[in-house]
Image (cartoon, helix red, strand yellow):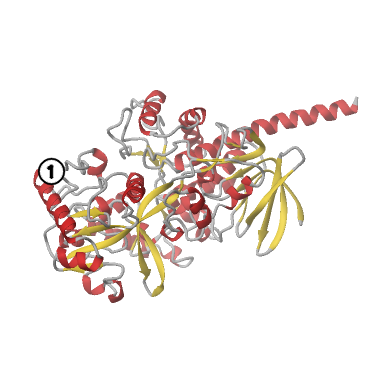
Amino acid sequence: MSSGESFDVVVVGSGSAGAMAALRSADLGLKVLIVEKAHKFGGTSATSGGVMWIPNHGLDGDQGDSRASALEYLDATIGVPVNRERLEAFVDEAPKMLHFLKSTGVDVAAAAWPDYFPGRAGARADRSVIVPTFDGRRLGDGRYALMREQYNRFKLFGRYAMDLNETFALMMQSKGWRMVAGKMIGRYWMDRSTRKVSHRDKRFTQGAALMGATYEQVFARGVDLRMETVLEGLTVEEGGRVTGIEVSNFGRKYTVEARHGVVLAAGGFEWNQALRDRFYPVPGLTRHSSTPEDGNRGEALVAAEAVGASTEHTSQGWWIPTMTLPMKGASNFHEIHQAAFDVGRPWSVVVNRKGVRFVDEACGYDQFGQAMVRDQIESGANCPCWLIFDAKFRRKFSAGGLMPTVHTPEHKVPEDWWDHYLFRADTIEELCAKTHLPVEAVRQTVANMNAYAKTGVDPEFGRGMNPYDQMFGDPSSTPNPNIGPIDKAPFYAVPINNGDLGTKGGLRCDARARVLDGAGQPIAGLYAAGNNSGTPFGDTYPGAGATIGPAMTFGFVAANDIAERAGNQRASDKASRDAAMV
């Protein structure tokens, strides 16, 4: 079973945490192997928005952020006990990680994105960091198409890559949006040399930009990447030190030695129903997740538990509202569509199955999911809830996978979608009959929203009354960009599930990214980062990029600790050899 192979560092998982652990380790002179079970590399990170939440990053000089301000905000936001040393390690090490990433040649820029709790002390609107568009062919034509591709929701017509500015222009149908779309389409077809290689747009945007630019540097440092290679278990020497991994590749099993450390960066467990049932108070279904289908199944967590590892913060996911539609051209298969911003648009309201609201619908998507869980526990009438909207909303905005009429007019909606995935009626009463929602409660909720639309004030939940909500509202809807009268037939309803971007909880780690056993002691040779580990933020999602920011930071921290210990080990080995020669 043994292959006889040996590396200084073995990284399990090729997402942002694994990529950074490998990049930093290789940059420090260590020999590195990444194993990835999927047929493509880049992990969930490559399919994401690619944002990193990095407080006090200093990219634009001193803009007033600080360690103290970041901790003030986190303290005002986190609602459960967390490892203080680990939390402070994130705040201290994240800017160092970003500086290192930039020093390798990866271009980064701060984005004007409000923290998700803008009313809390220490909140800012510049802590989210992005990587500009990357030319994917710089990875080489043999690798360019092997990076995990983004979902159709991040591409125009499922083909043309969109950066964040283009995404918001098209999503909001802001002035000049048709010209933006035309330029994107023309740019793609004018790139004739790439069309000879692949249908894929060479413009890597959002998560693909982050991962493409990072992997260019990973490959430049000679890191070995093996796909279709599944973690089967960890190898442990007498005394409990982790010494390597057992893997399989198309059924062929072998072991690989890790001389100085194994870094588990294989994502969370959202696609493992047994683990969801074990950890979540409201488990939900794996298929409601918006991460790559059947990808993150928690194998690395299970393997670590088998050698004594403990877990933390496993009761919650990184929630995001999702909805389900058949895959076009293959109706027996389904696609999951995010509805993160759709639920907070004007001319709409979200209700539970009792017909009443339960949250500021325009709040951060993780807060929305937490509210769904709370309401399900309290009322038993959520998960799914319902997004109700009128013809004005339908004309301008998407509702999950249902595109606005300018893209998908009524006659282009497949007939089998109506009254099964999407519901439409000429009156609110008829809509309630189709969705089995209580008529009087829904009628009253809609009347309340129509009254709030006139005053601009939502006395129930404050929808549209803070900078984060307003960022994704519609300026044409006044006096509140997130509230508009629901009064133009036909009326529509879409069931909304509590989906996720991954799991918040995972292996319990210390400030050095070392995996801890049940007694809180480090398991020698074993590290974890990303969603494979518990978030330093406990129960909260402080801002855009709060998954990838810590993932890359603790991948960086793990590599630094391994390199430091490897240096000590090398010095110890040399001393032993010298002593033996005396």
Q: Decide: is 510 above or below 319.
A: above
Q: Identify the secondary structure beneath mark 1.
A: loop
Using residue 175 as the reference point, say whether residue 353 is left or right of it.
right
Residue 64 placement (x, y as % from top left): 33, 25
Q: Is residue 272 visible?
A: no
Tell me what residue is drawn at x 61 percent, y 60 percent.
228
Residue 341 placement (x, y as % from top left): 29, 51
Density class for disc 1 (Cα within 10 Å; few <14, some 14-19, many ≥20) is: many
Residue 296 placement (x, y as % from top left): 52, 54
On the rendered image, what quadrant is the N terminus found in? bottom right
On the rendered image, what quadrant is the C terminus found in? top right
Front residue of 193 and 47: 47
Residue 210 placement (x, y as % from top left): 45, 47
Using residue 190 as the reference point, say whether residue 459 is left or right of it.
left
Residue, disc 1: 456
Q: Decide: is 149 above or below 257.
A: below
* Residue type beneath disc 1: Gly
Give the residue furthest to the front: 379
Front residue of 271 and 71: 271
**Where, by quadrant of the figure, is residue 581 drawn?**
top right
Tell me what residue is drawn at x 40 percent, y 44 percent.
51
Front residue of 173 and 36: 36
Give the residue furthest to the right: 582
* Tally of marks: 1
Using residue 576 as the reference point, say whether residue 504 is left or right of it.
left
Using residue 14 as the reference point, say whether residue 377 is left or right of it.
left
Q: Is residue 310 visible?
A: yes
